[in-house]
Amino acid sequence: MIDLDDTVLSDVKHGFSLPPKPSLITELQNALSDSNPDLNDVATIIAHDVGASAAVLKIINSPLYGLSRTVTDVKQAVVFLGLSAITTLVTSFLLKQSFEQSKCCISLERFWDNASDIADSIMVIGNKIKARVPIENLHLLGLFHDAGIAAMAVNYPDYMETLVAANKDYDKILVAHEEKKYQTNHAVVGYFLATSWNLPKDICQMILCHHDPEFLPQCKNEEQQLAFAALKMAENFVHINKRFVASPDWYLMKSDVLKALNLDEDDYQDIKEDLEDYFLEEQ
């Protein structure tokens, strides 16, 4: 399993531009650190940001949450989801706002569309397998796991060339191309971004290791195993849906993923069909 030392992290930090943690997240994290957090205070903090409020309500009222009633204001959303869950949803929204297209050499709209598809897919999988993982954590993991790609596209003007080369080279995954050219990769950069935003440690570790085939066999945390396995399955389904071929590292992880989720091949195909139906409905 990948483990970073301080030298690696300092190398990433030196001369590398990452979006700073938004003040709204800092306010929310400070509110949650109180021994007895107040729901009204948290709702008020979120409500001050119109965009974040709208995003939270849109997500919580989506079919992914399956609520029996429509949530119409942020306070209701906080009551329904809880303090930690609402903070992760706000974090997801703010992440997408933290990169500027004018400074980025890839299409951020296309990038976030793909990330959102993976985030939606991982939540569908989580609901299907009744995983003991908070749904909002799955969404945050799905959206945030490849954020290092956007960060590298901001820092390296030629990064699009690396993406194109990796897409044409099915035998070598993207992180290998990145390491050869930049001496770092998007998983390491994404980990650094996640830790600087004070995301939960388990999510940070999964971001770091999401291309590591040794992660699942060595992981001892059942909740983390389930979330990681759901992520890899979601990545693969989205890759198949968009490129008509399995994701490059799926063959390395498939057996461990199915084992972690306690699924057989028939179960896998059933979930694949459910996701195909879900995306058809979303079109």
Image: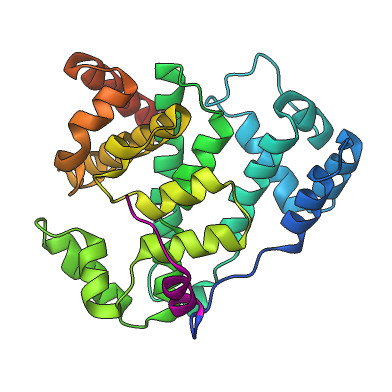
Question: In which image quadrant can residue 135 be found?
Answer: top right
Q: How many marks?
A: 0
Q: Residue at x 27, y 31 (%)?
A: 257
Q: Is residue 256 left or right of residue 83?
A: left
Q: How is the image coloured?
A: rainbow
- Location of residue 158 in the rendering, given as x and y in whole percent from the top left corner: 30, 82
Asked whether residue 171 is in view, the answer is yes
Q: Is residue 129 above or below residue 49?
A: above
Q: Is residue 79 left or right of residue 152?
A: right
Question: In which image quadrant can residue 110 be found?
Answer: bottom left
Q: Is residue 5 magenta?
A: yes
The span shown in magenta is 1-13
Question: In which image quadrant can residue 43 be found?
Answer: top right
Q: Is residue 45 above or below residue 229?
A: below
Q: Is residue 166 left or right of residue 8?
A: left
- Which is nearer the eye, 225 or 125? 225
- Location of residue 25 in the rendering, given as x and y in whole percent from the top left corner: 72, 55
Residue that sits furthest to the bottom in the current view: 15
Check the picture and name the quadrant holding the C terminus.
top left
Asked whether residue 282 is in view, the answer is no
- Location of residue 184 in the rendering, given as x and y in whole percent from the top left corner: 33, 72
Q: Residue at x 86, y 34 (%)?
A: 39
Q: Residue at x 78, y 49 (%)?
A: 28
Q: Residue at x 25, y 25 (%)?
A: 258
* Overall secondary structure of the magenta section: helix
- Which is nearer the eye, 166 or 104? 166
- Location of residue 171 in the rendering, given as x and y in whole percent from the top left corner: 9, 56
- Which is nearer the eye, 34 or 118? 34
